[in-house]
């Protein structure tokens, strides 16, 4: 079941990449396993998925220890949800990548926590070019200072940008959002403010548009694990 869904998602990614003249291999699938049990994660891992996303530190804390063998086998854990500053220490120990850095103070906490854990944490800065009223990330104006605050850190590396667009029934409506995110990424790379080129955007219902616009990490939950309760 999960294996068939993973295959279908990979097919959607590679078709979209092809339309945009990109290689499907430029896009990494992050299977967002929030609310789903460890067994479902094992099934996806067996189907070749190596990157998993969770959106709550507490849930990850209870789920991940039983999956230590997967991590030893190459699985990587991504924090995709909002991260509270007071959870930074735990997050730095649990996750390999944090997609949702939306506050310079959060970076200030992640840095010593990652250093103490003896690791280098990859982070993405969450930005909201739509600057919605209920903000999901930094505004464009706030992005530059945040990237500058991250520059030169040792235990935290800013590798890209992440976007969580407003809800839209028609994914085509999100194209300008995704495109703007790519432009901001390109500008940040040009200015030496990012050490990678990652662009985390696209979910179950809009991943085609995101891949066409340059996504390198797509965060897919429902299309792989089914609908979530609660
Ligand atoms: C849940 C979640 C996803 C996955 O959403 P689906 O619509 O189930 O694919 C992606 N990104 C974030 C930040 C999420 O919280």
Image: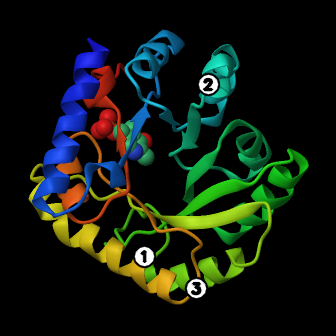
**Mark 2 and mark 3: Cα distance apart in space:** 33 Å
Please tell me how crowded label 3 is: few (under 14), some (14-19), or many (20+) other residues with Cα within 10 Å.
few
* Disc 1 target residue: 185
Point out residue 213 in the picture as x, y percentages from the top left corner. 23, 66
Q: Ligand 1 lies in which image quarter?
A: top left
Residue 126 horizontal/vertical position (percent): 49, 64
Is tag 3's residue or tag 1's residue first in the polypeptide sequence?
1
Q: Nearer the viewer, residue 172 or 31?
A: 31
Please tell me whether mark 3 or mark 1 is closer to you in this view: 3
Residue density around tag 1, few if under 14, some if 14–19, many if 20 or more, within 10 Å: many
Among the two numbered marks 2 and 3 on one chain, the one whose residue lies closer to the N terminus: 2
Between tags 2 and 3, which lies in front? 2
Identify the secondary structure beneath mark 2: loop
Q: Is residue 84 left or right of residue 4?
A: right
Observer-nearest residue: 106 or 38? Answer: 38
Q: Secondary structure at mark 1?
A: helix
Tell me how far mark 2 sits from mark 1, CA to CA: 31 Å
Using the image as rendered, state which of residue 105 and residue 41 is in the foreground. Answer: 41
Residue named by callout 3: 192
What distance separates the C-alpha of mark 3 from that of mark 1? 11 Å
**Which residue is under mark 2?**
73
At a point 64% along the width and 23% down the height, the residue shown is: 64
């Amino acid at each position: 079941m999960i294996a068939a869904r993973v295959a279908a998602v990979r097919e959607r990614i590679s078709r979209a990449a092809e339309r945009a003249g990109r290689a499907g291999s430029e896009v990494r699938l992050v299977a967002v396993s929030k609310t789903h049990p460890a067994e479902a994660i094992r099934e996806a891992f067996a189907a070749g998925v190596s990157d998993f996303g969770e959106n709550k530190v507490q849930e990850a804390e209870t789920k991940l220890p039983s999956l230590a063998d997967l991590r030893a086998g190459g699985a990587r854990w991504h924090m995709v949800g909002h991260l509270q500053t007071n959870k930074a220490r735990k997050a730095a120990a649990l996750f390999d990548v944090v997609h949702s850095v939306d506050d310079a103070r959060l970076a200030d906490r992640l840095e010593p926590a990652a250093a103490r854990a003896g690791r280098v944490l990859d982070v993405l800065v969450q930005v909201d070019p739509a600057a919605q009223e209920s903000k999901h990330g930094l505004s464009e104006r706030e992005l530059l200072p945040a990237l500058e605050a991250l520059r030169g850190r040792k235990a935290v590396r800013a590798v890209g940008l992440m976007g969580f667009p407003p809800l839209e029934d028609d994914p085509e409506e999100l194209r300008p959002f995704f495109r703007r995110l790519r432009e901001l990424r390109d500008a940040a790379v040009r200015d030496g403010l990012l050490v990678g080129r990652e662009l985390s955007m696209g979910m179950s219902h809009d991943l085609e548009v995101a891949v066409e616009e340059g996504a390198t990490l797509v965060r897919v939950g429902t299309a792989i694990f089914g609908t979530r309760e609660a």
